[in-house]
Image (cartoon, rainbow, N blue to C red):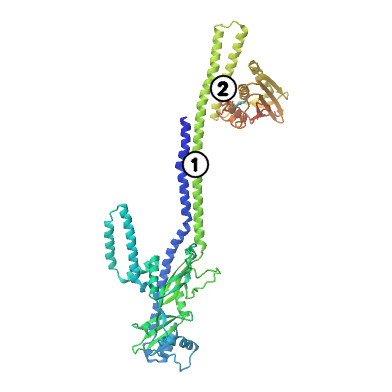
Amino acid sequence: MMRAYLTRYLGLFFIAAVIVPSVILSLMAVRAVNHEEAYLEKRLEKTLLEEVDHTVILLKNILNEIEKELSLTLDSSFQNGALSVFAQWKKSSSLVEVPFLLSKEKEVLLPNINQSLTNDELVFLENNWEFFSDQKPIPVYENIVDAYKDTILVESKKLKQKNRLAEKKKEVTLGYNYKDADKNVSFSQARYSSQSANIEQQQALNTFQESEPVRKEVYKQAKGKGDVLSYRTVLLNDRNRVADDMEQTEKLQSILIAEEFKFSEIIKNKSEGIIPRFIEGKLRHFFWKKAENGRIAGCIINEEILKEKIINTLPNVITRLRILNILDENGNPLVRFDDKTDRDWKRPFVSREIGEVLPRWEAAIFLSNPDHIRSRAHFTSMIMSILIFILFVSILAGGFLVLSSMYGEMKLAKQKTTFVANVSHELKTPITSIHMFAEMLKEKRQPDVKKQQQYLDIIVSETERLARLINNVLDFSRMGQKKKNIYSKRTVDLVELVKDIIETQKVRLEHNGFDVHFYVSCQELPVFIDAESIKQALLNLLSNAEKYSDNIKKIETEVLCEEGLAVVNIKDRGIGINPSSSKKIFQQFYRTDNSLTSRVRGTGLGLTIVQRIAQAHKGEILYFPHEGGGSIFQLRLPVHRSEK
Ligand code: ADP
């Protein structure tokens, strides 16, 4: 009772303690696995952005060097306007495409319109004289972070304060003492005020890049002030597109704002510089330098050479993981590959604008194999899923095995208890009757000789029953120990053996109201057996036929000679066996559950022993329902052919 109770609760405990947590854990693990791709992407994005930022710095340095080179190679005597100086300059630097000289009043002295001009010089004059003579202003680019540094810092402070306030509110509601936190704030503010302008610049840039609300506010203010805002050449990357956000455009706002200035305004307060200018959609660069007499010399920079210089300074353009490239004002890559993949150069994995001198240009990184992250994430997810699955199945299987073995153990323990009770009872019953009848005979209380004979018969049959029971128990324990050679086999005539058994049992069975029949289909049937064991098996079968017969008491025994097979059928007209139990009856301690079996005592070992004996003789024991009611037990043994 207690055990059944325990078992039921054990099942519930198992579900609660093992299955529920493992299901929850598995679900959590599966969720984590699903985010693997995004996580890998984020990590990679961070590393690659650092590389892009580094490239931007590199390019800015190259432009500085170009400016230096052009300034150094231009002889200071240029202010005299000697043609030879400019020819020499062009020779000494491949960057010089068309040199020019402007008078103090911004008149173009060189190339000289009155002399014969090359095609390049003609185009140059045509495109630029209006600009040089201050008749046509051009857009000058400025980094919005530089232009609005203070706004960004103020906005960022506001945002921080807002966040801090929200946090404080949280702390107050949670009942925390936040005095210490305040101290930290004032300390950091003190430190902040001593920061150099450079650091402030970096801070503003970081805030601008990281904070969407600050970005929005700054663009709003710039637009309000009439600055020209533009879009970048690169488009939003696939992974950053939000499918259900309809407002999201593919275009990205440029970090550069433009304002129109005349040439003289641009060069005011400076001695030399590089001016970027879009001419018919193409970005060109002018180098200029002021002389002491107010004249200005310069050149249009050879774009091919400029690009070449940039390409040559790019570190490790292609690696196994990524491709580093520079995109020009039209979004075309500077470094061309014929890797045949139809890469969308307008959608890099990460990119940054280079800056004021190279407006619309981008330093960009593309993944060498865009599917790499996906397949890596997929691979990791797959491995993790398999592991989770194996773990889950193992937990379930392990739990199931533990439970079922516990159930099995409990069942066995219960069967053993019943077995002990049954064996004691089975021993007690014959001993009681033997004792009773032996005492009656000893005290000569029964004068009738016929009755005396009957008493003796009962004593004999009860002794046999006792012997059989003890044999069964002994056999069972011997078999359990798996000892070898417990059988001493010899060739025996099975017909003779069965006939003997029936003859000895017939009197008692008939006395108990049984109709006993015996058929043999052949004269002789040699089998190689341990006669005592086979006898015990047949006695067990006969005893069962007797025990489990109720109204019709009829036992038929057949010995049949089949091809190479000796068959003994023991048929009764008893209660029969339910098909659902017919397989289990051979299990140890198993007894069917019905009114007769509960009345008839047994150990549940008889058929187990019969089966083991049959198997030890390379034979088998089968059960068939008897047509018309009852059971048939069939013992099949191989026929022994003596070699001649
Ligand atoms: P037991 O000591 O209970 O007889 P057995 O191993 O000999 O143990 O038999 C196992 C069970 O098989 C019995 O409890 C009984 O329910 C069923 N059984 C065996 N023989 C017969 C039969 N001839 N007729 C009906 N039921 C039988």
Residue 188 figure quarter:
bottom left
Q: Residue at x 34, y 58 (%)?
A: 166
Can you tell which mark lies on residue 599? 2
Assess disc 1: are there few (<14), some (14-19) or many (≥20) residues with their C-alpha within 10 Å of its C-alpha: few
Find numbered disc 1 in the image and state the secondary structure of the residue it sits on. Answer: helix
Residue 352 screen position, x and y as percent? 43, 70
Task: Name the quarter where the C terminus is drawn.
Answer: top right
Q: Is residue 117 visible?
A: yes
Residue 597 figure quarter:
top right
Q: Which residue is mark 1?
A: 398
Between residues 539 and 295, which one lies in front from this camera angle? 295
Q: Residue at x 52, y 25 (%)?
A: 419
Residue 135 screen position, x and y as percent? 41, 87
Residue 463 screen position, x and y as percent? 57, 16
- Circle nearer the N terminus (2, 1): 1
Which marked residue is nearer to the observer: mark 2 or mark 1?
2
Q: Residue at x 28, y 60 (%)?
A: 184
Between residues 492 and 507, which one lies in front from this camera angle? 507
Numbered disc total: 2
Q: Is residue 109 above or below residue 449?
A: below
Q: Residue at x 38, y 75 (%)?
A: 225
Q: Quadrant of ligand 1?
A: top right
Find numbered disc 2 in the image and state the secondary structure of the residue it sits on. Answer: helix
Q: Amino acid under label 1? A: Gly
